[in-house]
Image: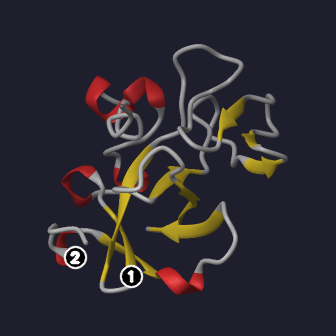
Amino acid sequence: MNDKPAEAARDLGAEADFEAFPAPVEVDNEPYFIVKNAESSAEPYRLISAICPHAGGEVRVYGTEFVCPMHFWTFDMQSGECTNVDGEKLACAPVFVRDGRLYADFPDGKSVKSGTIGRSAERSNAEKGACSRSRS
């Protein structure tokens, strides 16, 4: 269980309600996917934005990756890293479980719409690495 206060994070819903992954959700009227984090049992889930950093298109699940239908950028489902354009990635936030509910831990409590982890050109290096910090 995570020691972070649930009040400071965004409640995504009951863990039991998410049976298939990636699971589409909305936070502040912005689309995201909850994905299972195969890299870490300490952080079993992560939240990945469904907004492409290139032109703002909404990515879709296609096979084992996310694809933006506007210009066909493709993204890894685990990390959000772009697989056909170096140095780009989908915005993401760690997710923790508390009392059977999933919570997104956004920097400063703000989602993409609020401008904290928006398009890659606008994000700081620390924010770009939000999904990859848990990797060993």
**Quarter of the image where the C terminus is located:** top left
Question: Who is closer to the viewer here, 121 or 128?
Answer: 128
Q: Secondary structure at mark 2?
A: helix
Residue marked by disc 1: 101
Could you say which quadrant of the image residue 111 lies in? Answer: bottom left
Is residue 58 left or right of 14 when viewed as pictured?
right
Residue 132: % across, % down: 40, 34
Q: How many marks?
A: 2
CB of mark 1 within 8 Å of CB of mark 2?
yes
Is residue 115 left or right of 50 when viewed as pictured?
left
Tell me the kind of residue under disc 2. Ala
Question: Who is closer to the viewer here, 41 or 84?
Answer: 41
Q: Is residue 54 above or below residue 114?
A: above
Could you say which quadrant of the image residue 116 lies in? Answer: top left
Question: Who is closer to the viewer here, 70 or 93?
Answer: 93
Residue marked by disc 2: 6
Image point (61%, 28%), residue name:
54
